Amino acid sequence: MSENKLVEEPRVLAGPQFNSGNFAVAEAALFAGLHGYFGYPITPSTTIMERLASRLPYVEKPGAFLQAEDEIASITAVIGCSWTRNKAMTATSGPGFSLMQEGIGLATFTETPLVVVNVMRGGPSTGLPTFPAQQELMQAHFGSHGDYMVPTFAPNNVQECFDLTIEAFNASEALRTPVFVLTDQILSTLKERFLIPKKENIELVNRSSPDNPHITWKGETISSNLVLPMNCFGEESKAFATGLSHDDTGHVDLSADTYELLMNRLKEKILTYQHLFPKPEKYLIDDADTVVVAYGSTARSAKYAVNSARKKGIKAGLYRLRTIWPFPKDDIIQSLRGKRIIVVEMSSGQLIWPVERYLKQDVEHIGYLRGSVPPPSLIRKKIEGVN
Amino acid sequence: MKTEFRASGVGGQGIITMGHIIGKAAAIYDDKKVIMTEAYGPEITGGFAVADVIIDENNINYPIVDNPDILVILSSNRMEKDLQSVKTNGIVLFDSNFIEIQEIRESYIPIPAFETAIKLGNKVIANVIMLGALQVITEIISKQALETILFERVPKKFEELNKEALKIGYKIGMNYRRNNNE
């Protein structure tokens, strides 16, 4: 049902809502202060774009909205918009995320704050365009060429679609980096009650500038050695941005020392502040013998299965990742090592890689490829050891 | 208690709107835990349309409706599939204009929604007549919640039509109400 009539609404809606994950993402972006949306429609992400097309240019403090010719242009326009000291984002799915990879690399190297929402569907290629999957976990980390890390958050309900989109904007501004929000087709259309909190109850972060180099996020001052204050285009001080190796002022410098320093700093700034990223949900894991590891809408099914197993007296638990990258390796080792682990995902095997790598033990796996969330009965049987 | 609801029909009949109104009414005004999912064919009008709503006192994890307690059918194109999925004593409301059910059970209730809508002068109001009947028969949502959510989205010029449709829906529903105290 279309709720996208051109009606006069405040920029930030208030109070309880009953709507979809995509709706929540769009409203969260407006809440966070989105100024530019550039995108190309693709199922199942399109309703984010539709909602912002009908809202962004018409609210008080209007912003720019552009349907570009393709995803390559979209992500590049998002980068450009961000360099005018404005918050910018795009949303896409499947093939669109592939097309954006070049621009994403540029955004990481130029340290451009922006948010990309990837509403995952079944791939490869056109795949299952209207059904859910979780096959872009690795692409979120390794999709573009070169070494880099983009903080990647994964909600599993509509409230989190709202909350984690705001966290994504905050992280992108605080650390001068692109941030991904990975949702999926189920979350995109699933409607639930969610609450848009009062403006004063949510911290919004804006990137530092040469005049104001010290910003804080969640009470921590962000080190200006790791995250450089950002000069933007159209301001008094000059701004430089390049995809070539560069020094701290943005000027090209291909020397070994400069390149190594830059690469290490880019990695370091993400890892240093990863404790500020969304924490995993640990459900009944303390006394659990068997723990299911999952994220996104798959984790909803897993939680149901864990509850069913508990009713039968089986000590099962759920470890749900909310930040995928950087992978919460210390926490997962501390919480799960030695327990029986079942990784459940809508992929033939991506989440299982980091889980196996860090736990260094045998891990069981459900790689569900049937275009829907794995049914709880399937997970419960695996927990029970029935195949 | 957990209630699984499904409305099934074709695009253009207001199926998704129906699900949205029930879901929002239960979630915002009746303060229940609610999940709504929707499915439709690629066509805008004429393709299948299904709205699923789960209402519970507790948090809902698994979001899929497998066996509805309440099924509303406005078109025959998916009828067999939907009737098979419904719980044994599940309530089925069907539009008696479009649908003929061979093995009719006690809990299957014909509602002349389309015919009544035509009499009111606008076929698009059939889903509201159905909503009225549904509320009275099943009490899946409260009357107050239904009216609040419905009229918050109805444009002013259609308010009278919707009011009338709802009233007729309530009246039709009264004939089939299980615990008829009035």
Image (cartoon, coloured by chain):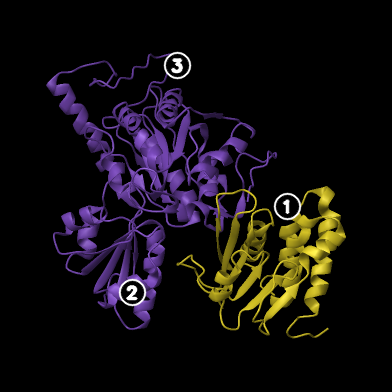
- Describe the element under mark 1 as helix, strand or loop: helix
Q: Is there one chain holding both mark 2 and mark 1?
A: no
Image side of residue A282 versus residue B45, left or right: left
> Which amino acid type corresponds to the residue marked 3 in the rendered image?
Glu
Q: Are marks 2 and 1 in contact (CB under 8 Å)?
A: no
Structural crowding at the residue carrying mark 1, measured as other residues with C-alpha within 10 Å and reported as few (<14), some (14–19) or many (≥20) = few
Residue A210's spot in the image, x, y percent? 38, 22
> Which amino acid type corresponds to the residue marked 1 in the rendered image?
Arg
Of residues A178 and A211, the one drawn nearer to the viewer in this rendering: A178
As drawn, A223 above or below A356:
above
Of residues A315 and A37, the one drawn nearer to the viewer in this rendering: A37
Which colour is chain A painted?
purple
- Residue occupied by mark 1: B153
The residue at the point 35 percent across, 29 percent down is: A103
Structural crowding at the residue carrying mark 3, measured as other residues with C-alpha within 10 Å and reported as few (<14), some (14–19) or many (≥20) = few
Alpha-carbon span between mark 2 and mark 1 = 42 Å
- Residue occupied by mark 2: A380
Q: Is residue A218 visible in this depiction of the protein?
A: no
